[in-house]
Image (tube, helix red, strand yellow):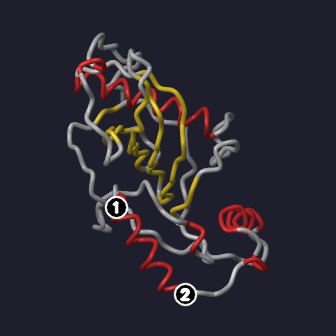
């Protein structure tokens, strides 16, 4: 796995940058049952929702929430339109190339992220569980994973990790951080630093996402 030395908390909006994140519409064609089911899972059946915003207003709102939370906290219940930025259903798989649930898949990425964090910060957190994950789908995926980890004294903290699968060539761990608003790690968290179990310089192709065809 490749690990980025550049910490980029802010959302990139330059469309020429491969890590750009700007939510756009996914068209709902009459025979596109997969996308219709995805939309229904996100915001419920259409009969249970009322029109509050125009499609353009919805696009502005979702991109505002993405920027303000750096991609981690978006209220998807507000939107009737389907965007290429959406929440994971953790007990399902977001890709036909993955033979495990998102809970297991993102759990593995979170373990790799917290291992990197431990090395850089001198801490010894152990991954516990994934709380949620948001996905941005373009010519690859960018994952925004929120997860829980514990220190040697069994105190828990909530972490956020951004993981990129740009052009589906390789996984890049962009950053892992404590979720903003929490107290910084104390000395009890800085005991035994565990080395990651994966090769941070690997350039192997990542078989983790579908490539959207233009």
Q: Which residue corresponds to the image point at 34% horizontal and 61% vertical from the top-left?
A: 20
Q: Which residue corresponds to the image point at 32% horizontal and 42% vertical from the top-left?
A: 182
Q: Which residue corresponds to the image point at 56% horizontal and 66% vertical from the top-left?
A: 76
Residues under labels 2 and 1: Cα distance?
Answer: 25 Å
In this rendering, the answer to whether 97 lies above or below 89 is: above
Q: Estimate how packed mark 1 is, as few (under 14), some (14 to 19) or many (20 or more) residues with alpha carbons within 10 Å.
A: some
Q: Estimate how packed mark 2 is, as few (under 14), some (14 to 19) or many (20 or more) residues with alpha carbons within 10 Å.
A: some
141 and 86: which is toward the camera: 86
Instruction: Give the labeled residue for mark 1.
Output: 20
In this rendering, the answer to whether 41 lies above or below 199 is: below
Q: Report whether 200 appears left or right of 91.
A: left
Q: Position of residue 191 (x, y in %)?
A: 28, 12
- Quadrant containing the N terminus in the rendered view: top left
Image-quadrant location for residue 113 = top left
Instruction: Give the labeled residue for mark 2.
Output: 53
Q: Position of residue 188 (x, y in %)?
A: 29, 17
Numbered circle sitting on residue 6: none
For the residues carrying marks 2 and 1, which lies nearer the camera in this image? Answer: 2
Q: Secondary structure at mark 2?
A: loop
Q: Which residue corresponds to the image point at 70% horizontal and 79% vertical from the top-left?
A: 49
Image-quadrant location for residue 126 = top left
Q: Position of residue 210 (x, y in %)?
A: 58, 50
Q: Report whether 25 appears left or right of 37.
A: left
Are dots 2 and 1 in contact, CB under 8 Å?
no
168 and 60: which is toward the camera: 60
32 and 194: which is toward the camera: 194
Sequence order check, earlier mark of 2 and 1: 1
Q: Secondary structure at mark 1?
A: loop
Image-quadrant location for residue 154 = top left
């Amino acid at each position: 796995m490749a690990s980025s030395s550049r910490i980029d908390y802010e959302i990139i909006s330059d469309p020429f940058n491969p890590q750009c994140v700007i939510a756009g519409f996914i068209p709902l064609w009459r025979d596109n049952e997969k996308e219709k089911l995805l939309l229904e899972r996100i915001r419920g059946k259409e009969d249970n929702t009322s029109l509050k915003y125009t499609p353009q207003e919805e696009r502005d709102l979702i991109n505002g929430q993405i920027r303000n939370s750096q991609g981690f906290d978006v209220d998807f219940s507000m939107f009737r339109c389907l965007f290429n930025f959406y929440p994971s259903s953790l007990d399902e798989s977001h890709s036909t190339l993955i033979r495990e649930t998102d809970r297991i898949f993102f759990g593995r990425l979170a373990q790799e992220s917290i291992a990197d964090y431990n090395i850089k910060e001198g801490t010894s957190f152990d991954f516990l569980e994934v709380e949620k994950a948001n996905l941005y789908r373009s010519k690859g995926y960018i994952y925004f994973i929120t997860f829980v980890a514990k220190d040697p004294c069994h105190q828990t903290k909530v972490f956020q990790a951004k993981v990129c699968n740009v052009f589906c060539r390789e996984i890049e761990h962009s950053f892992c951080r404590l979720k903003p608003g929490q107290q910084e790690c104390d000395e009890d968290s800085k005991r035994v630093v565990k080395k990651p179990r994966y090769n941070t310089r690997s350039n192997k192709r990542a078989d983790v996402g579908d490539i959207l065809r233009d």
